[in-house]
Image (cartoon, rainbow, N blue to C red):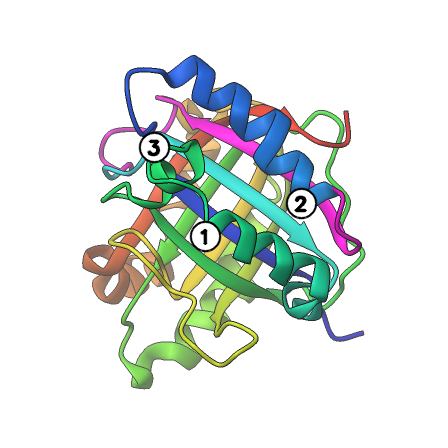
């Protein structure tokens, strides 16, 4: 079955010194409003962790929010559009407006492209997320890029103890046809790995699988085009 699972991926920093109040607003109001809309399946929030080795990690916003929806049609539904319109009308000192005004905020709508199934469910012991994303890859390398990811890199990573699953996504336009890619850290392609712990990055298995000849070849194209290469710890999930 062709995957239709869609995600909204947002990364940002706290909009001010009132970070604890902002986190409370995010989870009790911003997220709750979306979970009331049919088609929103689950929402998770993550905070940047230090588990990924410094030679792999790149700078990025502290917080990542991952919204899972059944299909992109949810984002053109009347309830969702009404919520977006309401939030856009809020005053400039509201958490909603201040969050949207953050210079580092990056977001995008993504469609799942691997694996070819939309039967994903969040593992109960998934406490961490490895998020990797690239942008502006040359057209002539895309076929090999996808082949490497799908036939070598992900199958190899799934053999590492603690890697629970892996999914890949491609940026999509908004339902109105406008670009959904926003901000300095927004990728065109994203790979998300559910992990039990980020201690696994210290293992020989991780290092070996990250330095194969094919991986080295692909990194010649991707290394300078990384928009996201970070480990995050889960701080909220709506299904618990």
Query: Which callout, 1 or 2, points to the residue nearer the camera?
Result: 1
Numbered disc 1: secondary structure: helix
Residue neighbourhood size for the residue with mark 1, other residues' Cα within 10 Å, grouped as few (<14), some (14–19), many (≥20): few
In this orientation, which residue lies closer to the viewer: 191 or 240?
Answer: 240
Task: Give me the C-alpha separation between circle 1 and circle 2.
Answer: 15 Å
Q: State which quarter of the image contains the N terminus.
A: bottom right
The nearer-to-camera label among 3 and 2 is 3
Q: How far apart are marks 3 and 2 (CA)?
A: 21 Å
From the image, tell me which residue sits under label 2.
34
Quadrant housing the C terminus: top right
Q: Name the residue under label 3.
A: 93
Q: Judging from the image, what secondary structure is the residue with disc 3 in?
A: loop
Give the vertical position of 174 relative to 129 (above or below): below
Which numbered disc covers residue 88? 1
Q: In this view, does 226 lie to the left or right of 21?
A: left
Name the residue rendered at 61%, 31% in the picture: 29
Identify the residue at image location x=76%, y=28%.
124
Looking at marks 3 and 2 on the same chain, the residue that comes earlier in the sequence is marked by 2
Position of 78 compared to 16: left or right? Answer: right
Mark 2 residue element = helix
| Left or right of 117 on screen, residue 56 | left
Question: Counting residues from the N terminus, which is met first, the one under dot 1 or under dot 2?
Answer: 2
Residue segment shown in magenta: 36-57
Q: Is residue 210 above or below residue 79?
A: above
């Amino acid at each position: 079955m062709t995957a239709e699972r869609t995600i909204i991926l947002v990364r940002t920093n706290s909009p001010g010194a009132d970070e604890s109040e902002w986190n409370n607003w995010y989870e009790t109001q911003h997220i709750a409003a979306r979970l009331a809309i049919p088609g929103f399946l689950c929402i998770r929030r993550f905070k940047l962790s230090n588990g990924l080795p410094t030679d792999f990690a790149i700078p990025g916003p502290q917080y990542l929010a991952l919204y899972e929806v059944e299909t992109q049609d949810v984002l053109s539904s009347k309830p969702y559009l009404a919520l977006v319109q309401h939030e856009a009308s809020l005053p400039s000192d509201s958490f909603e407006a201040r969050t949207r005004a953050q210079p580092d905020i990056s977001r995008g709508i993504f469609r799942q492209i691997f694996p070819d199934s939309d039967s994903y469910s969040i593992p109960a012991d998934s406490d961490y997320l490895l998020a990797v994303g690239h942008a502006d890859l040359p057209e002539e390398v895309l076929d090999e890029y996808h082949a490497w990811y799908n036939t070598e890199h992900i199958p190899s990573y799934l053999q590492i103890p603690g890697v629970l699953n892996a999914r890949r996504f491609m940026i999509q336009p908004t339902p109105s046809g406008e670009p959904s890619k926003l901000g300095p850290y927004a990728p065109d392609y994203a790979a998300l790995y559910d992990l039990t712990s980020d201690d696994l990055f210290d293992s020989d298995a991780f290092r070996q699988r990250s330095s194969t000849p094919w991986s080295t070849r692909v990194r010649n194209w991707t290394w300078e085009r990384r928009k996201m290469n970070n480990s995050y710890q889960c701080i909220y999930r709506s299904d618990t």
